[in-house]
Image (spheres, rainbow, N blue to C red):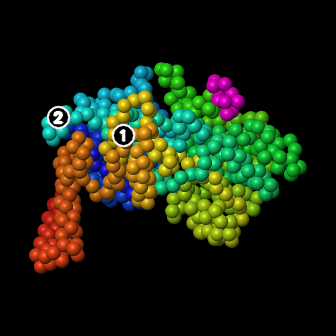
Amino acid sequence: MKIKFLGALGSVTGSCTLLNHRGRYYLVDCGSRQGSAGNIYEPDGRIFRFKPSAIAAVFLTHAHMDHCGRLPSLAKQGFNGPIYCTQATAKLARLALLDAANLPGSQFGTDDVERLRFKCFDDDPRFQFGRPIGIDANLSVSIIRTSHILGAVGFEFQFAEPSSCGSRQRRTIVFSGDLGNNQDHHCYQALLNGRQYPSTHASYIVCESTYGASNRAALFASYPERIAALDRVLADAVAAGAPTTVVFPCFSLQRTQELIIDLHCLLSKRQSGVFAKFASRGDPSANSRQIEVMVDSPLAQKYGQVFAHELRRVRQSGKPYYLNPELPSRLGLTNDACLDLLDRLFGVRGATQMFDHYSLSYEQSWGRMQAPPLQIIIAGSGMCTGGRVVGHLRRLLPVPSCTVVLTGYQGEGTPGAELMKRARDSSSPINVADWGMRNSQVKARIVEISGFYSGHADCAGLLDYLFHKDSEHEFSAVKRVFLNHGEQSAREGLERAIQIRASERRCDDRVIEGVELPHPVGSWFDLINDRWVREWHPVVEPPEEAFAIVMNLLALVEATIGTPAGMNANSSAQSSLVEELRAMKAILQQIRGEFSRIVS
Ligand SMILES: [Zn+2]
């Protein structure tokens, strides 16, 4: 097997890796990029750098757009194979893609989404995480749960091929997908059970590195602390005066569902600080007429219904597929009562639910004469780039008794990043011109609790994933770890951390022999012979790719012999060689120009 890294190299969007096993080509993920570098598979954002019709199948890790967002375009341009994933991912990805198809400027339509053929591993009642499933002759795949979002998994491909010296070799390559925080022994986040580890046989691991260079404080790995932080935010909001409105700009997938559970944990008990503040405000009998949680997001409601269904599912062994085993006891409920509650919280039992001390609604209560004493609004988008939250913020940012709570990553240049500046420094000026507002008009409190809600493992979590070893089994060494899905500084930070940890040679650790950061303009990596190879695969790669390979080679040779050290050795011969290389490049560029003219 050979692999070629195409996307999410030095960035966190546009995940895509090409696999070649005995003449058949597969993709792991086919995500959209969001304006960042490091993705070469669709240079102009429309045309793939491979032939979609030559792809036999896609293995999809999870339903985030940076992993699935280009699938409809892939189908539109000729891909007709199955998309292997979990049932949860198929349902969530379909909803996400249908929503994206209706956005202005979308490069695909709903018909392109409808033609995608999801093939779910867990359609088979005998499905088990970690058990190999045959894909092709001498190729099988095991599914590893990652606890990043509902349905998210990594893939472990097992294959056998003859090596260059003729002997038959068995190898295993693991694709981590995005890794969440929950671990088997510590499911501190609300909904999902723990993530699993690569098997004993992993010879290569492709690992994400989103937070590879940083570690979160231990505080953030505590569910009671998370609830306490949320309690403080709401109590402070009530103390700020009436009418109290708290807005959570929130990602509609996973973050919204977690927040709904957290708010229920808090508001279903009278001991919350919110009620004490109400009492001190002269409202001693806070009840469901006084606190309203409003989820203003039709997409989040659709996702919620998938959550309610999938969290209910159990495997043949009787164990749940995804449900956090700690959730029922945290809520003080039996398993069945907990699942019924999830149906109510996620909108399966109707758009409005009354609980003892608060109400939860998925629809605007237009008929209400006046706002309740405390209204909590959850609305997308998470980075405030669009969606319903924009209307709420326009209305509420000038109101001093309102609070905006950020719970997630805010990309550079987004309105959410401006709000984050103010959350971290209450005197910081912010630019809200996009919403027709001046800095001086922003009177609402802006706070953040994003550390508690991250869906990605930090450096320590990634090291735990990579080095974890079940001491009962014989382990083979990992030849190389390839790092993708991280900004360059995060990849480099994780690379250093892996090297340091590997050099310690702890007896409980898996052995890792090397770590690498694949480049955006890369070669194929031969997993049987353990080396990079410069090849053009005309079945899947257009002629343009052959040009690119030769041009890169020439640039490499030019850079090597054109270095000052080389020039000193034999300056006139070296410089004439460099001149000749440049002439060759120019001619090739000319041929490429002619070629594109003929093709177009
Ligand atoms: Zn993700």
- Which one is earlier in the sequence, the residue at label 1 or at label 2? 2
Residue ID at (31%, 50%): 5
Q: Quadrant of the N terminus?
A: top left
The residue segment tinted magenta is: 328-338
- Tell me the mark number nearer the camera, choosing from 1 and 2: 2
Residue beneath disc 1:
174
Q: Is residue 567 visible?
A: yes
Q: Which residue is mark 2?
A: 167
Q: Residues within 10 Å of mark 2 (few under 14, many from 20)?
A: few
Residue 362 percent coordinates (x, y): 65, 41
Relative image position of residue 251 (x, y in whole percent): 56, 48
Residue 329 falls inside the magenta stretch: yes
Left or right of 555 on screen, residue 217: right
Left or right of 451? Residue 539 is left
The answer, for residue 55, to whether it is visible in the render is no
Q: Secondary structure at mark 1?
A: strand
| Quarter-of-image position of residue 520 | bottom left
- Label 2 element class: loop
Residue nearest the observer in this picture, 371 or 304: 304
